[in-house]
Image (spheres, rainbow, N blue to C red):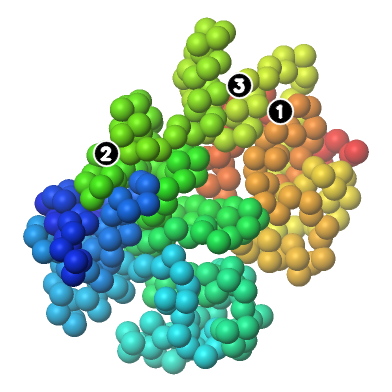
Amino acid sequence: MSSILETKNVAFSYENGEDVLKEVSSGIPEGKKTVILGPNGSGKSTLMLHYNGVLKPKKGSVSFRREPLRYDRKGLTSLRQNVCLMFQNPDDQIFAATVEEDVAFGPLNLGLSRDEIEMRVYEALETVDLIKYRERPTQQLSFGQRKRVALAGALAMNPEVLMMDEPTAGLDAQMVHEMMELSEELNHKGKTIVICTHDVEMAYEWADDVILMYEGGVLYNGDIDGLLEREELLHRSRLKYPTIYKLNRQMHIRTGEHELPRPQSLPECCQKFFKSENIAPGNFYIAYVDDPGFDASIIKAFKKHNMGVFGVNAKRTSRSMGLDIHHYFYAIDQGLIKASVGEDYLLLTESSVKGLVKSRIDRFMMNYCSDIQIIPPDDISRRQHV
């Protein structure tokens, strides 16, 4: 996999003279989800600011699509049209009076037509579920809502690469999952996503690739499994192993159970650690709310706690239709847990994320529970009314 962004021997120091980046060589693979991981003060945010051209290296080079960055006005404008950054603190990014004005600022600077700007602003606000707040003064928004505005501003640029510095900082558990689920959906739709964090648990469950930083240097750049196999690197960087990884390791030591495949999510963990051989798996029903033939009455055939919705547009549609859905977050995981212990589950989703839903379910079935039946909603004869 080729790198869409690269640094070669980059060194940087702020005005106090302290070296923040030391001969940093790194690469961001195109089309993947990458985490820049490390403890506080390791240089994560500074590296991200170099990728976006906010900072210029004192030594070394940064390239986008194998072309060295140009730091003149034209070069930076072109770069930031393709590589957008969401800051950790949204107040460092939001400055317009209203939500709509702030999201429109970037596209306006690109010289786009009024119709194109309107379309981009609308789509960005729809994506982050803030369309009803488009005329709201930004000062009247909560911290989490301002984070969404900052994200919408980046999305309105329609970048190839979306970079987010500590995107879950200051958010409650529900909004954390919403942010991560949205980033996964954006990646599925073609964007390269880069997140800067010190959260190893999140990196383990979400990331394809990791750049591990410590004291201004890169200790590791590669896939997450490769990092976890090098215990000395995590120890040196003062980071802990993910809990699920440690539990899987202990199970191997204590019972002889194979370490591979390593579970990365709660349903995978449950299925590997707690065998349910005497329970016949249930059925996993999938309905697409954007299908012209979608019949909302199918939810009557399922228990409330056995229904979930996945996808930004699917959630919006479900709410607008007044559907009483229990799992608005972790819906796929909850469905796999329910189905693996013999219960039927209905997932409402949308056609644009069909491949993402399929890949998540396929991984679980291939490695942990192959007997779950995936059933389209129009197959009424196989639906068990409860």
Amino acid type at image mark 2: Tyr
Q: Which residue is mark 1?
A: 340
Q: CA distance from mark 3 to mark 2?
A: 29 Å
Front tag of 3 and 2: 2
Q: Is residue 42 above or below residue 132?
A: above
Q: Which residue is mark 2?
A: 220
**How far across and down, in percent of the image, does residue 86 sit?**
41, 68
Quick one: SS at disc 3?
helix
Quick one: SS at disc 1?
helix
The quarter of the rendered structure image containing the N terminus is top left
Q: Are marks 3 and 2 in contact (CB under 8 Å)?
A: no
Q: CA distance from mark 1 to mark 2?
A: 36 Å
Extreme-front residue of the structure: 16
The quarter of the rendered structure image containing the C terminus is top right
Extreme-left residue of the structure: 59
Front tag of 1 and 2: 2
Q: Are marks 3 and 1 in contact (CB under 8 Å)?
A: no
Left or right of 114? Residue 279 is right
Left or right of 59? Residue 246 is right
Q: Are marks 1 and 2 in contact (CB under 8 Å)?
A: no
Q: Which residue is mark 3?
A: 272
**How far across and down, in percent of the image, does residue 159 sit?**
36, 68
Amino acid type at image mark 1: Ser
Q: Residue at x 67, y 51 (%)?
A: 329
Q: Residue at x 65, y 46 (%)?
A: 330
**How far across and down, in percent of the image, does residue 161 sit?**
34, 62
Going from N to C along the chain, the mark reached first, 3 or 1, is: 3
Amino acid type at image mark 3: Lys
Query: Foreground: 324 or 329?
Result: 329
- What is the crowding at mark 2: few (fewer than 14 residues within 10 Å), some, or many (at least 20)? some
Q: Is residue 332 above or below residue 155?
A: above
